Image (cartoon, grey):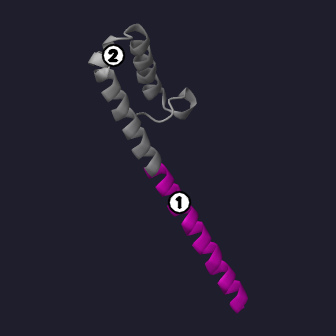
Amino acid sequence: MHPDLSSHLHTPECNILISQLKECHETKKFQKFLGACSDIDRTVQRCLKKELADNRKKNFDQSKLNRQKVYERMRQEEQAQKQ
């Protein structure tokens, strides 16, 4: 089962693969149950997994920057209160 496959949620590379998978499912209605679209499906899964890992790393890096800003602001406020 895939996450939401809406085009605005994914990278252009994954969107191309998703459209190929949808086309395969439409053209091979019964063969898809026998594995006709399995290769494309695995490729889409790999792309979505890579995309998720990239997003996690980007969000983690952003959270580190935000945390540093908060700590810096707290230090400045402490110094201002001591004076």
Q: Residue at x 54, y 34 (%)?
A: 9
Q: Mark 1 is on which residue type?
A: Ser
29 vs 7, left or right, is left
| SS at badge 2 | helix
Whether residue 70 is situated above or below residue 39 in the rendered picture: below
The residue wearing badge 1 is: 63
| SS at badge 1 | helix
Q: Main SS of the magenta segment?
A: helix
Residue 22 in picture, x, y percent from top left: 44, 18
Q: Mark 2 is on which residue type?
A: Lys
Residue furthest bottom as drawn: 82
Q: Residue at x 37, y 39 (%)?
A: 50
The stretch of residues the image draws in magenta is 57-83
Q: Residue at x 39, y 11 (%)?
A: 29
Whether residue 53 is situated above or below residue 72 in the rendered picture: above
Graded by Cα atoms within 10 Å as few (under 14), some (14 to 19) or many (20 or more), the crowding at tag 1 reads few
**Discs 2/1, front:** 2
Between residues 82 and 63, which one lies in front from this camera angle? 63
The residue wearing badge 2 is: 32
